[in-house]
Amino acid sequence: MRLLIDENVPDSTAKAFEALGHETIYVRDDNARARDQAVARIAELRGAIVVTWNVRHFRPIIRKRLGLTRRSARQMGLIGFRCDESIGAKRVNEVGSLIEYAFSTGKQVSSDSVAVTVTTEEVRWELGFAR
């Protein structure tokens, strides 16, 4: 998967995704302090899944399709963490295969948007969250 790492994601979490073989693009490398709408647009242009701890801001941005075409909003992906940042890498190592499964299965079933939420205790995924 190609992942766009939001500026609030610890490097250790991004490195855990890289260790699983995923391509990571860091927002801060090119767009330091980019607004969430800009991050969503960058993800759209690069065909990347947004990885963030700022889930509650990204869901409405993608749902409202701010700056996104209707088609690209349907194809957006979001991996949101709702746990302490200090355990992000640990959670990726524990549930990385579940995250991969959610996106793989979601894209096979539908070309719709996929959102995965990682908490301390569980992983939830949802198809069509951008509707």
Image (cartoon, rainbow, N blue to C red):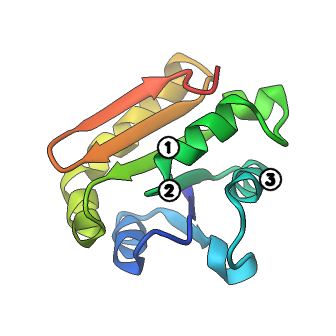
Q: Which residue is mark 3?
A: 45
Marks 3 and 2 sit apart, C-alpha to C-alpha, by: 15 Å
Q: Is residue 75 visible?
A: no
- What is the number of the mark on residue 51? 2
Looking at the picture, how far across and down is residue 41, in whole percent?
A: 77, 52
Mark sitting earlier along the chain (3/2): 3
**Residue 74 occupies quadrant:** top right
Residue under the image location 43 percent in, 57 percent down: 53
At 28% from the left and 41% from the top, the residue drawn is 98
In the image, is 91 to the left or to the right of 17? left
- Secondary structure under the numbered disc 3 in the rendered image: helix
Q: Which amino acid is tagged 1?
A: Arg
Kind of residue sitting beneath label 2: Val
Q: How many residues crowd mark 1 within 10 Å: few (<14), some (14–19), many (20+)?
A: few
**Mark earlier in primary sequence (1, 2):** 2
Identified by mark 3, the residue type is Leu
Disc 1 to disc 3, how far (Cα)?
Answer: 22 Å
Q: Position of residue 38 (x, y in %)?
A: 76, 58
Mark linked to residue 120: none
**Residue drawn where x is 57% and y is 37% of the image:** 59
The residue tagged 1 is: 56
The kind of secondary structure element at disc 2 is: strand
Please give the name of the residue rendered at 28% of the width and 64% of the height, measured from the top-left corner. Answer: 88
